[in-house]
Image: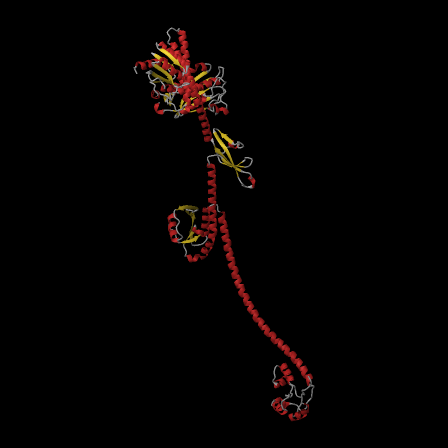
Amino acid sequence: MKILVVDDEPLVRRSLQRAAERRGHEVQTASNGLEGLEQWILFSPDLIFLDVLMPEMDGPTLLLQKPKSSEAKVVMMSAFTGEYDSEAALKMGAHVFIPKPFEDIMKVISQAEELVSGNR
Amino acid sequence: MEAHFKVFTNVERVSDLLESLSDSLVPVALSEIELADAIFGTSDLRSQALVLGTPFVLVEEDLSLESVLESRYQHKDFSALETKMEVVEFSEVVEETLRLLKKKWHEQLLRSNWIKENENLQEQLLLASKKVEKFEASRIQRAQALRKTSLLLRKRIFFLKSLNKAMELSEVVSMIQDEVRKTKGLGGAILAVKKNKECSVLYSSGRLVVERKIDTWPSSSTVEWRQSLANVLKRPIGPLLQFEGGKSKLHLFVEHQVPKAGLKDFISEWKLRMVGLQLVVDRFQLEKELSEAALFWEKTFDGLEEPIGIFDRNFNVIRANQLFTSDLMAQLNENTVRRGGQVFHVESYKIGKMSDLVEGAKVIHLSDQSSAYQLKQHMIQTEKIAALGQLAGHIAHELNNPLTGIRSLCQVLGSDSQLSEQVRLDVAEVEFAAHRCQKTIKNLLDYSKPHTEDHRTPTNVNDVVLNTLPLLKSLMGRFKNEVCLSPTPLVALIDAHMLQQVIFNLVTNACHAMGDGTKGTIFVETRAMGKKLLIRVQDEGPGVPEELRVQIFEPFFTTKGENEGTGLGLSLSLNVIRRFGGELSIDENYTKGAAFEIQLPLMEDRR
């Protein structure tokens, strides 16, 4: 499965990449929305981990401009649980909302796998 | 006067006489007769001759001798006339006689005048003495009346004076009663007084004077009053004399057993005395009003809920209410005065002129600003917290991301089976530290956002203390620890995690306060206190200086070194406890160090 991680925090990008790779997935990363859009088009991921607040272009904006052909599932992540919740995320075009900080990254990966395999 | 008369004496015969006389007869002028008339008081010639006592012949000028003779001869004295006549100079005799007569006459006249006058005088004297008698009689009468009046007056004045000395109305009534008894046939005296809507009746009962309030004030009719008084005194009332004071607000009734007609003096006297009595009653009522007014003012003054007083220019107290304690007076030079937790603003008003003695006096009012002060402090606190919230939010976001990364990466690393056990444990330790950081940040966010979800559950505070103290072992280990928990569970509606933070905070502060040594005891106690529970954390450090006891609860205030404290601990703790409906305070009576007390409402039904 091809996974794209879009987050401006290098440690988050790296940890998600490592965890996903450990599970045998192919991972690309982007540090902002613009990069993310580019990667989305070039890499055609099956799943995207998308941060909300980022420089250049934020997550919701990126979702508005996503390639129409893409069927990638989107996992939205944010520390601002007060402002964004699952409902808001779904309205913006995401499929799942995961609040930051993660308690267990492995669970996050498995949650994402389940989303793509259609178990949820 | 020429000798016109010739007096013939010893005339033998009238004819002779006439013969001898015919030549010498001289007519007497009428004027001379008039003279005689004047002298003798009569113009009757015969009478004149008689008066003279000497026979003579008078011939009137215009009459013939014959006619004269005829008339004269009729007088029988002439028959006795001597023939021998001695002619005497008439004028001398007459003059002499006239003189004598004149004198005699004059004397007679004087005498008769004197007698007349005397009689008049006597009459007048009589009249006068009668008048004097009459006057004397009336004078005595008047004097008696005057004496009587003055006696009455003196009595009246004496009585009214003695009334004036009375201290109260009942004394007046007993005096009236005594006075009334002096007149026979009179019985009880009853005084009815009306003031505003308050009517009362006073009367002597034995030696006492009874005062009874009455609901209605009868009209002036004595009949009505008699009934009314019978009701009040609860006995039949005899015939009454009624005396009315001014404006029919004062009545004096006197029972009498003798007919009214016999009491005229008494009635007229007491009508007059009523004026004085009215004055005395007025005085009592006025005094009462005055003292009531003074009492009212006094009560109002003392009842004011804030300190107020009158001071002279040197701040010496002239008059102050009870709230104006001396410790407040000592600070009057300042604009703001404090007592305990109360803050007063000094408001001073000059008094124009009270009297020469206290010129420059002023009223000083201490207006209680405590609640305003507290409100202001609370607002400042809220503002600070809001600022802190923004800051915390920002920091939380900035830190959460890397911390999430750190934790996640640690988790990824830790799950690598190829790593040695040692490295795996190290990585786990890093992840745990990152986790703690996240928790701190979360708490900071919770603190600054008071409206986040409510995690309060009924919790036994004893458990919270027991769970917290082990976390502090490294800090507390150096000191003697005493933990004294309530034997019964103390359940409060709290967030255990937050309370743990507070206790953690207080114990940490206690340890820091006791410094690097190992001396001293840290004492932690929980107990029930009425409807509240108490958690006490006590140390034996230097204590909190009095002037800092308010400040230490303010955000960012710290006495610790640069890297030792944020100045948020106590502020956060206070905020947390208040959110639980409790209070965090310093025990000001504890002097061996510092003692912080958390009070929380007990959930009694959950015990």
Task: Identify whether B566 is placed above or below B315.
Answer: above
- Name the residue located 52 percent from the left edge and 63 percent from the top edge: B138
Query: Which is nearer the eye, A35 or B229?
Result: A35
Residue A25, given in percent of the width and then of the height, sits at 35, 10
Q: Position of residue B60 (x, y in %)?
A: 63, 88
* Colouring scheme, one of rainbow, by chain, secondary structure, one colour: secondary structure
Camera sees residue B355? yes
Quadrant into which the N terminus of chain B falls: bottom right
Q: Residue furthest left?
A: A119
Image quadrant in which you'd find residue B124:
bottom right
Given residues B437 and B390, the one toward you in this image is: B390
**Left or right of B510: which side holds A119?**
left
Q: Taking B250 as reference, is B127 left or right?
A: right
Give the tally of numbered discs: 0
Q: Nearer the viewer, residue B48 or B192?
A: B192
Q: Nearer the viewer, residue A42 or B484?
A: A42
Task: Please indicate whether residue B262 sits to the left or right of residue B104 in the image.
Answer: left
Residue B585, given in percent of the width and then of the height, sits at 45, 24
